[in-house]
Image: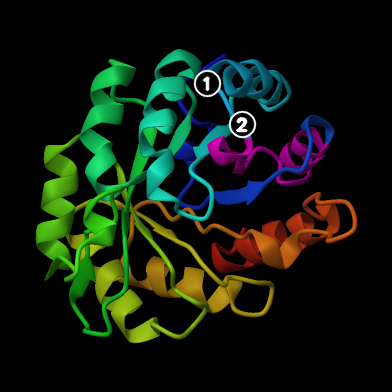
Amino acid sequence: MSLTPNYLKNRLCLNVLAGSVENAKEVYEAAKGHVVVGVLSKNYDTDERAIEDMKRYIEVTNNALSVGLGAGDPNQSTMVSRISSILQPQHINQVFTGVGTTRALLGQNETIINGLCSPTGKVGYVNIATGPLSSQAKEEAIVPIDTAIKMLQDMGGSSVKYFNMKGLEHIEEYKAVALACAKNDFYLEPTGGIDLENFEEIVQIAVDAGVKKVIPHVYSSIIDKQTGNTRVSDVKILLDLMEKIFGE
């Protein structure tokens, strides 16, 4: 299994959830490898069970595993770090304060680690108090997006996970984040409320800004509520939109 993500050859990669190992395999094939498949650590009560199960996802996706927190839950930060050190996945979701620990435990620089930064209502600024304790503080830690990116780079991070975007609600702030990522040669992962309707606009903004790698998270909007699986047909639609954006 390779640590180097298949999608690193491309500017755009999907991040979607899988309701089962079989669903992960279907999604991976439908996206033609341009995807990392999220499995949430919050769904497991022990590290051992998470590791055992996630290894099955690794096998069917050529290690295109994205170890997730679970709705950005900061209390999952240390568990994500621990299990990722064993699994060595291609992609990891982390709160801002957990990035350094995760990179150190991995012992390598290939895996992409995002750092969760949140909208503030103020263009050009993000909230980095997204950790287990800092997220409970009375006041947010609001810093310029450029500073947040530099701090993530100090800790060995790869990308900004911009959450919760709530679709297009924070679009002007998102544009500033995209420009900052492009300027600092940093990846961008727009997350929260992305669906088939707004996907193209959200991704196009990042592409137009010059972001080197864009990893949009498309979760609940494409999950079948009856089965809990991501709809393969929707993944194919997203792949078509990706190809349209890049003129392929």
Please name the amino acid that badge 2 sits on. Answer: Tyr
Dot 2 and dot 1 residues touching (CB under 8 Å) = yes
In the picture shown, does residue 230 fall above or below 166?
Answer: above
Quick one: SS at disc 1? helix
- Magenta span has 227? no
Q: Nearer the viewer, residue 127 or 210?
A: 127
Q: Is residue 52 left or right of residue 201?
A: right
Q: Which mark is residue 153?
A: none
Q: Nearer the viewer, residue 46 or 121?
A: 46
The Cα atoms of the two marked residues, 2 and 1, are separated by 7 Å
Q: Quadrant of residue 37?
A: top right
- Magenta span has 24? yes
In the picture shown, does residue 203 fall above or below 233?
Answer: below
Numbered marks: total: 2
Q: Which residue ends up furthest to the right in the rendered image?
A: 226
Quick one: SS at disc 2? loop
Please name the amino acid that badge 1 sits on. Answer: Asp
Q: Residues within 10 Å of mark 2 (few under 14, many from 20)?
A: few
Quadrant of image for the C terminus = bottom right
Span highlighted in magenta in the image? 23-43
Residue at which label 2 appears: 44
Q: Position of residue 28 (x, y in %)?
A: 72, 38
Q: Residues within 10 Å of mark 1 (few under 14, many from 20)?
A: some
Residue at the image position 79 percent from the left and 36 percent from the top = 20
Q: Is residue 209 left or right of residue 83?
A: left
Q: Which mark is residue 47?
A: 1
Q: How is the image coloured?
A: rainbow
Q: Position of residue 199 (x, y in %)?
A: 59, 72
Quadrant of image for the N terminus = top right
